Structure formats: structure tokens, C-alpha cells
Image: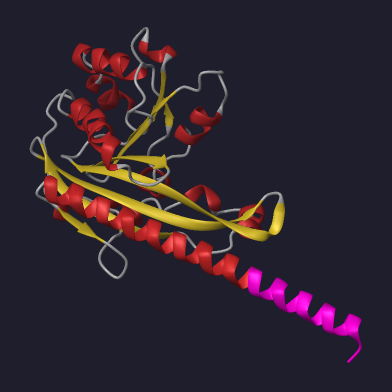
Amino acid sequence: MKPWELKLGLFVLILVVLLALMFWWRWRVARREAADHAADLARFAAMMGGTASGPGEDVSAWSAGLLRPFAHEYGSVIAWLGRVSDSRFEHALDFERHGWRIRVTEASIELQDPTNADVANTHHERRVEVATSELPPLKLVVRSPGGGGGARNWAGEAPRPVADGGSREWRELTLPAGLDRAFAALTGDPHRAAAMFVPEVVQRLLAEAGADDFHNLTLEGGIAYSVLPGQIDPERLLQEVDAITGLLQRFPGVRPRNPASAA
């Protein structure tokens, strides 16, 4: 073997070893972060007197049959091309808060990096659910600060029971003066939905508009839920839960419900 061939071989070997070490280190860090996150969720559940579930256990959202995780990544060829893996639920927290039964789930999906087709990035979303008595189907969302149509477009997609039923029109709800500048709402039952926005509800929502805990809410199938980007953050979770339950307890005639009969 010529000297330059030996040097080239050693260079390639060193490069392979370095790449292997890099991938091993990234895998090790990801494993450690996942274990730490699961431990944080378990500690939170124990503090709340609830339970934490992980992969291999029942971790699906109550509303999974109504809305799959990362639903916006399905339904088009472009979305299909960008998916490296299917979406999947990975964690679930079950606990009670002020008499309301709560389930918080976390899902993930791997998507192709928009700048490098050879790289896949893991994305997470969390879903905060509250089992409640039957309410008119409704989507409520904070309007985009810049006046963009993203929030309105999301709310314009009818929940599955309304879309499948075909007997009710999904339409925008006229909100009380002042509230309509901060929120957009659509419903399949305008009369019943309008009756929910009593003064106490309006005051609560106006207060939430200045905070960062309430972003969107869907009411369907005996479940009130909010879907948010990112993993579950135990330090912020109770604020996100209270943003929903604080609203529910002000809706006229609404009461907690056994999740076994929700959905």
C-alpha cells in the first residue's frame, strides 16, 4: 500500500469514528433529556395526586377520535411529503383540579427540515383536556396580533361531529362588543353559544387576552380542549389548565363530567 493510500485510509477511518461518536452523543443526550422529562412529569402527577403514563401505556387524548395529533400535517400531498414519521402520543397526565377531571397529553412527529431534506426534526404538541357537561360545539381563538388570518382559518374548520352531521352550518359567532377585537369564535349552534357569553365570561376572557395562558379552545363531544405547540411544561401547566377551567366554571349551567362518558 502506498503511503498516500495509507494516510487516506486513516483519514476516512478517523472521520467515520468521529461521525459515529457524534451520533452516539446526540442519541445519549436525547435519551437523557427524555428520561428527565418523564421524571418531571411523574413528579408533577404525584404532586397533584394523579398519574403519569408513558410509551406503551394509555397515552391517547380523550379527543383523539375527534382530532388526531398534528392534524395540520395531514390531508395534503405537501404535508405527506414532509412527514418522516406519523404523529403519536407519548405522555399523558391525569389529575383533578378544582373538581374538574383533567387529561394532558403530549404528542410528537418527525418532519423533514425545510432547509435540508436529509435532516428530520422532532416536533411536539400538547393537549389540555377537561371533561365537561355537554356544550354547543364551539371554537374560540385569540386573534393574531398582526391581524393575520391563521387563527380565523383554524376556527373555520368545523369539529368532526358538526362536519360529519351535515345538519348544522358552521358559522362565525358575533361576540360581545370589545371581546370581538381580541377573539374569534365559530359554532354550529349560534343561539346556545351566544347565551354562554355572560358578563362573567366576557370579563374572564378579556383578562386572559392580556396573559399568555389562553390561546384556543374547542368544545365538542363533552370535552373542552386546547392544543398548543411544544412539550408539557410542569411549571406552566396549571396556568394553562386554570385558563380553561376558569372559563368553564363561568359558563352558565356547565359542570364537571366523568371522562368515561366524555367523547
| Quarter occupied by residue 195 | top left
Residue 131 pos. (x, y %): 18, 44
Q: Look at the image and give the residue range highlighted in magenta.
A: 1-18
Q: Residue at x 33, y 25 (%)?
A: 190
Residue 78 pos. (x, y %): 66, 53
Q: Residue at x 31, y 36 (%)?
A: 137
| Quarter occupied by residue 117 | bottom right
As for residue 7 lying within the magenta part, the answer is yes
Would you say 153 lies left or right of 166 here? right
Answer whether residue 89 is visible to the viewer in this image. no
**In this figure, what is the number of numbered marks?**
0
Compared to residue 38, the image places residue 199 above or below, namely above
Compared to residue 63, the image places residue 16 above or below, namely below
Q: Residue at x 34, y 28 (%)?
A: 214
Residue at the farthest bottom position = 1
Answer whether residue 232 is visible to the viewer in this image. yes
Q: How is the image coloured?
A: secondary structure
Q: Quadrant of the N terminus?
A: bottom right
| Quarter occupied by residue 150 | top right
